[in-house]
Image (cartoon, helix red, strand yellow):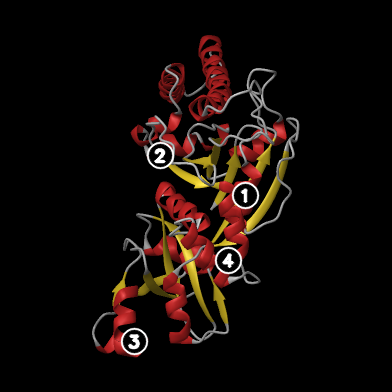
Amino acid sequence: MKLGIIGLPGAGKTTIFNALTRGDAPTGQSMGGRFDVLTAVVDVPDERVDTLVPMFEPRKTTYARVTYNDIAGLKKGIGESGGMSGPLLNHLAALDGYVHVVRAFASELVPHPDGSVDPDRDLETLDSEFLINDLVVVEGKLERIATGLSKGSIRDKTAAQREQELFERLGDCLNADKPLRDIVDDLTEDEEKSLRGYGLLTIKPVLVVVNIGDEQDEVALDYNHAHSRIVNLRGRLEMELSQLSGPDGDPEGLAMFMEEFGVTELGLDRVIRESYELMGLQSFFTVGEDEVRAWTLTRGSTALDAAGAIHTDLAKGFIRAETVAYADLVTAGSMAAARSAGKFRQEGRTYIVEDGDVINIKFNL
């Protein structure tokens, strides 16, 4: 899963990036609208992996991973002043979703570029820039279809008319100032696939992170869009806590600060959990003496999809999937005990994988 951390200048994107990645990138430095990206790959915390490791004592342990990109270069008016640059647009389009950081904290040391703190306004501002980008794409496509149909240069007129109808629906949504993710559930699978090469930005899921001060109450936003979620994070505090939680951190200091500030769950854990829910993702596991590993899969995926996630050869030569639920395996205490208890299942390629399934793929090439 690749997520882009976006936001207007001064929102605290890099602070949130550090909080989510245990990083120490310099904060408070405006890029002046220049496109730049910081990247970090983060293990997905999973207590189930931690439980499976002592059961199998593997030589290697691999957690699922999330890639975070801290993206600089977005600012008010970027969609209108000639459009977004090619590199910036290509990078945004290649991401699975966005973590949109919105400023709600006040600071005399870091004045807001617009002179006042207004998270609703800032959220709408960047949303509008993305919407303008998508509207330009959609209108351009409709113009090309209309020209082709009028000139008779399109051979498959039926397919072109279907495409025209699709883009008209997209245009209606955007012209109503609504992101395309509001109607993505109304699209067929084929329609959704056909749109993947157009670089549409508002169709992607968004986790809005409201960046509040250390002593500030949570802020409620009026943001009712599909495939969107909102969380409040005390960005500066979470950055400090995440650095205490790392391998070289201070567990006692971490526990003390979390208790002092009433933090029950680290922001990095919370954002990952919310992102999984938002993106419709789940985990399955492969286990053994060589490796215990968590894999990421879209909900509703099949055993064949799981095989392909592990390796394309497993999908090509798929015979069956030996499957046991994580809870059943842990209750039994071992693979052998789970088999004896009748908890193992032999599933075919169309089996719908459940979150936490422990899977062994049988294949033949």
Secondary structure, mark 3, is loop
Please report the residue visible at 53 percent of the width from the left and 68 percent of the height from the top: 63
Is 53 placed left or right of 350 in the picture?
right
Asked if residue 18 lies left or right of residue 315, the reply is right
Label pair 1/4, CB-CB below 8 angstroms: no
Question: What label sits on residue 227 in the rendered view?
Answer: 2
- Badge number at residue 205: none
Q: Earlier in the sequence, mark 1 or mark 3?
A: 1
Answer few, some or many: residues within 10 Å of disc 4's Cα (few below 14, many 20 plus, some between 14 and 19). Answer: some
Are discs 2 and 1 less than 8 Å apart at CB? no
Q: Earlier in the sequence, mark 2 or mark 1?
A: 1
Tell me the kind of residue under disc 2: His
Q: Nearer the viewer, mark 1 or mark 3?
A: 1
Q: Nearer the viewer, mark 2 or mark 1?
A: 1
> Where does label 4 land, which residue?
245
Contact? badges 1 and 3 (CB < 8 Å): no
Which residue lies under the disc numbered 3? 333
Which residue occupies the extreme top position in the image?
A: 150
Q: Which mark is residue 17?
A: 1
The front one of 195 and 207 is 207
Pointer 1: residues within 10 angstroms few (<14), some, or many (20+)?
many
Element under label 1? helix
Across and down, in percent, residue 158 comes to 41, 22
Cα–Cα gap, marks 2 and 1: 22 Å
Residue type at numbered disc 4? Ser
Q: Nearer the viewer, residue 358 or 215?
A: 215
- Whole-angstrom CA distance, mark 1 to mark 3, is 39 Å
- The CA span between labels 2 and 3 is 38 Å
What type is the residue that disc 1 sits on? Answer: Phe
Instruction: Between residue 209 and residue 343, name the one nearer to us.
Output: 209
Residue 323 in picture, x, y percent from top left: 34, 74
- Residue drawn at x 51%, y 25% is 124
